[in-house]
């Protein structure tokens, strides 16, 4: 800001405020005459210190932060910029990061982990503000191994005692679908593939809700479910043209990765839809299979509450059905609820069965650890140990000789 | 966005496996904390564990003593025989009363049935008194609430013992058939015995970790056998400071659980990240136990130093889980 007035030397009005080294001066631009020195204020304190000193420098804040911490904070800020997060997120993430690095359990971890720590802080911030960011995204941005990220994240959550709300599927659907390139006409997207975004988002959301009601979501990675649901909803919006398109091709055209579990999720979703279709009056006449049911997804979703109740014995019946299945014994059918099966046999005939997570309906054969036998339980821990038993574990001299020759012990 | 990296596939596969194959999972989880106790075990307490040990345990103070003398008597023998039975239904009624009996025992309530001397490890049959001993009691919610009738089964016990002499690991690996030693990978000898089926890590300092036993007594017996092997190899091994460091149990509540709902209502205790692990990690404060709860209804409990903590933790979580059974 140039003060009003003219230079006493040459009379020009071109006065410029300039700093000579660290001292403010009012100088004439034409002749160079120095009109005044020092800050053009009347505050005593500022006149005393005739220097402009930034706050962070005067308080020594920057010096207090180690280079590692500074670098980490910068990384957190860059990450927030790349993800286009609001500034509030950035501040929160930086504060978490600072807290975390001061914490004794993180103070001395490897540099690799410290880098991940920044990413974890951003991730936690996003989750707390219900911003649907998946771990996969952060890991790919940090080029991190997911196992390492997982361990750092869990210890961060524990040490700082952060409460991280669950990932909201609805938001995840919207965000994930944003990355699909099917909503505009483009050179590599065939005309019949293009779809209206709103319709697809709504339908995908409904299918994902259906999946979560039917136990397909609990305990599973969310992204493959969303991908499978998107595929089904896209197919069902124009079944004639799209039924022939495979899942893999769909993902390639949409420009999205196809995660391997998505095939299984698709299969499970179709099974659920088929069960529901068997309850819809005007579909019973048709023999439904995995392809044809897609055409009717719209109707199934519209009546899903009614169909779910009929297709599966829910809630109160679950217990009875589950125990019936487990014991393979007939259970007296309930009075009011319609269509609850007596036992699992009926389920195979296509009648309503219990609504259970897939891990319970298709249990894999596994070794059951035998319950402790009576002899095991009689052990007191102080029994005498026979020498012969111990000797079976020791090598004889010939064996040692042979071993030595074979292995050449140093 | 998300890449279908081999790691994600692996985690997904692990997730599926964990859901269905719980018999191996406890082993995996004990590896989280067998070493997180300070290995130089300076504990002076003499560990003739079980009974006396449990007597000195701090008792929960928030439940008033209740008169439970009306409950049927269960002795130790009965309970253990029932554990080896095939179905839980059979034990349901009997097991249901165990918690309360033991509770009455520990609280030394005058009004409840008399409590036998805790140092007796083997109970008499048809005892008027409730079962004692290796168990400290569970804390009942109220006498009116039903107990679950399910008893968690112990899957793994991790214990440590001090052999109190320096060991030459190469020597041990050479002279013992059941030992493996790979100094580049791990600085201890890994030794295994067949009965009880356990694994031990023997360090050159003389400290030893014994894992894989299914009960406290088995763990102690196994540790003694390992010490005996080391003795026979020529080292002056002793058997000091035997201590159970971790116990893992598992059970099945037999109904599917809405983990998303559970994490909402018990947010301060639960951590549920389906992207990382299919189960919900519940950190119970009292007793200090970590529970892994899966959608199939299987529950893994770990972090206990005593058997009773596992039982208590399960009794605490069961009503919470039942609350999520109907809400679907």
Image (tube, coloured by chain):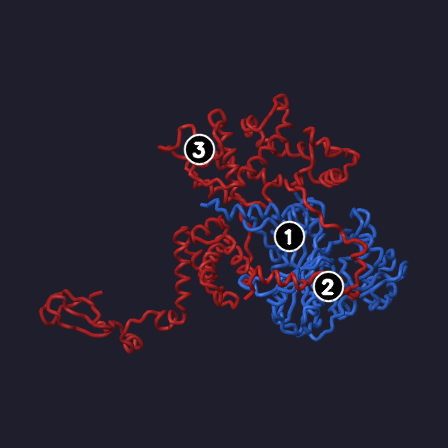
In which chain is the residue bearing label 2?
A
Nearer mark to the viewer, of 2 and 3? 2
Q: Which residue is mark 2?
A: A390
Q: What is the CA distance from the residue labelled 2 to the residue labelled 3?
A: 75 Å
Q: Is residue A245 left or right of residue B122?
A: left
Q: What is the CA distance from the residue labelled 1 to the residue labelled 2?
A: 30 Å
Q: Do tags 1 and 2 sit on the same chain?
A: no
Indicate the position of residue A38 as horizontal and vertical percent values. Answer: 23, 74
Identify the residue at image location x=65%, y=39%: A362
In which chain is the residue bearing label 1?
B
Q: Which residue is mark 1?
A: B25
Q: Which residue is mark 3?
A: A196
Indicate the position of residue A325 as horizontal and vertical percent values. Answer: 74, 38
Say whether residue A237 is visible.
yes
Q: Which one is in front, B202 or A274?
A: B202
Q: Residues within 10 Å of mark 1 (few under 14, many from 20)?
A: some
Nearer mark to the viewer, of 3 and 1? 1
Among the chains pictured, the one given red colouring is A
Q: Quadrant of the N terminus of chain B?
A: top left
In which chain is the residue bearing label 3?
A
Looking at this view, name the residue that lies furthest to the top. A285
Label located before the other in sequence (2 or 3): 3
Among the chains pictured, the one given blue colouring is B
């Amino acid at each position: 800001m140039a003060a009003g007035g003219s230079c006493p030397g040459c009379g020009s009005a071109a006065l410029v405020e300039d700093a000579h080294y660290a001292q403010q001066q009012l100088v004439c631009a034409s002749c160079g005459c120095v009109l005044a020195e020092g800050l053009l204020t009347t505050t005593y304190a500022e006149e005393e210190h005739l220097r402009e000193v930034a706050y962070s420098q005067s308080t020594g804040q920057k010096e207090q932060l180690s280079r590692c911490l500074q670098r980490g904070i910068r990384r957190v800020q860059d990450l927030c910029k790349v993800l286009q997060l609001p500034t509030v997120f950035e501040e929160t993430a930086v504060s978490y990061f600072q807290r975390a690095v001061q914490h004794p359990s993180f103070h001395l971890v490897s540099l690799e982990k410290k880098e991940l720590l920044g990413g974890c802080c951003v991730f936690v911030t996003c989750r707390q503000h219900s911003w649907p960011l998946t771990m996969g995204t952060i890991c790919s941005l940090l080029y991190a191994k997911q196992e390492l990220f997982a361990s750092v994240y869990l210890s961060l959550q524990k040490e700082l005692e952060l409460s991280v709300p669950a990932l909201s599927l609805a938001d995840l659907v919207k965000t994930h679908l944003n990355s699909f390139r099917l909503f505009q006409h483009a050179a590599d997207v065939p005309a019949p593939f293009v779809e209206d975004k709103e319709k697809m988002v709504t339908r995908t959301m409904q299918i994902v809700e259906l999946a979560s009601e039917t136990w397909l979501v609990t305990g599973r990675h969310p992204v493959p479910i969303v991908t499978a649901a998107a595929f089904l909803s896209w197919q069902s919006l124009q079944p004639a043209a799209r039924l022939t398109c495979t899942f893999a091709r769909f993902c390639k055209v949409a420009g999205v990765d196809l995660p391997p579990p998505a095939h299984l999720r698709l299969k499970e979703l179709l099974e659920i839809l088929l069960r529901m279709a068997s309850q819809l009056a005007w579909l019973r006449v048709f023999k439904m299979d995995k392809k044809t049911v897609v055409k009717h997804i719209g109707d199934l979703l519209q009546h899903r509450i009614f169909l779910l109740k009929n297709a599966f014995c829910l809630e109160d019946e679950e217990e009875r059905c589950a125990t019936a299945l487990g014991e393979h014994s007939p259970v007296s059918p309930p009075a009011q609820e319609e269509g609850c099966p007596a036992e699992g046999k009926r389920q195979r005939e296509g009648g309503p069965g219990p609504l259970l997570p897939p891990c319970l309906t298709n249990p894999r054969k596994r070794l059951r650890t035998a319950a402790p036998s009576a002899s095991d339980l009689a052990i007191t821990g102080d029994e005498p140990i026979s020498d012969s038993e111990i000797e079976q574990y020791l090598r004889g001299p010939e064996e040692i000789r042979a071993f030595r020759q074979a292995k050449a012990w140093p | 966005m998300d890449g279908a990296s081999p790691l994600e596939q692996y985690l997904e596969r692990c997730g599926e496996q964990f859901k269905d194959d719980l018999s191996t999972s406890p082993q995996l989880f004990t590896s989280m904390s067998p070493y997180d106790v300070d290995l130089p075990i300076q504990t002076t307490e003499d560990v003739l564990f079980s009974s006396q040990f449990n007597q000195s345990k701090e008792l929960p103070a928030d439940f008033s003593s209740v008169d439970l003398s009306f409950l049927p008597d269960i002795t130790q023998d009965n309970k253990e025989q029932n554990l080896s039975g095939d179905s839980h239904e059979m034990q349901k009624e009997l097991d249901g009363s165990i918690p309360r009996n033991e509770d009455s025992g520990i609280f030394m309530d005058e009004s409840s049935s008399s409590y036998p001397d805790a140092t007796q490890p083997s109970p008499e049959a048809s005892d008027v008194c409730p079962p004692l001993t290796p168990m400290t009691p569970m804390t009942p919610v109220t006498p009116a609430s039903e107990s679950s009738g399910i008893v968690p089964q112990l899957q793994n016990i991790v214990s440590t013992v001090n052999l109190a002499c320096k060991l030459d690991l190469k020597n041990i690996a050479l002279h013992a058939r059941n030992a493996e030693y790979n100094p580049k990978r791990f600085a201890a000898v890994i030794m295994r015995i067949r009965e009880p089926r356990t694994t031990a890590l023997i360090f050159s300092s003389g400290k030893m970790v014994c894992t894989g036993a299914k009960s406290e007594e088995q763990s102690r017996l196994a540790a003694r056998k390992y010490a005996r092997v080391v003795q026979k190899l020529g080292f002056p091994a002793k058997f000091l400071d035997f201590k159970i460091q971790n116990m893992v149990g598992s059970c099945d509540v037999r109904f599917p659980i809405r983990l998303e709902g559970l994490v909402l209502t018990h947010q301060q205790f639960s951590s549920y990240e389906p992207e990382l692990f299919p189960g919900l990690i519940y950190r119970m404060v009292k007793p200090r136990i970590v529970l892994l709860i899966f959608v199939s209804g299987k529950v893994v409990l770990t972090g206990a130093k005593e058997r009773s903590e596992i039982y208590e933790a399960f009794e605490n979580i069961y009503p919470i889980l039942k609350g999520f059974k109907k809400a679907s």
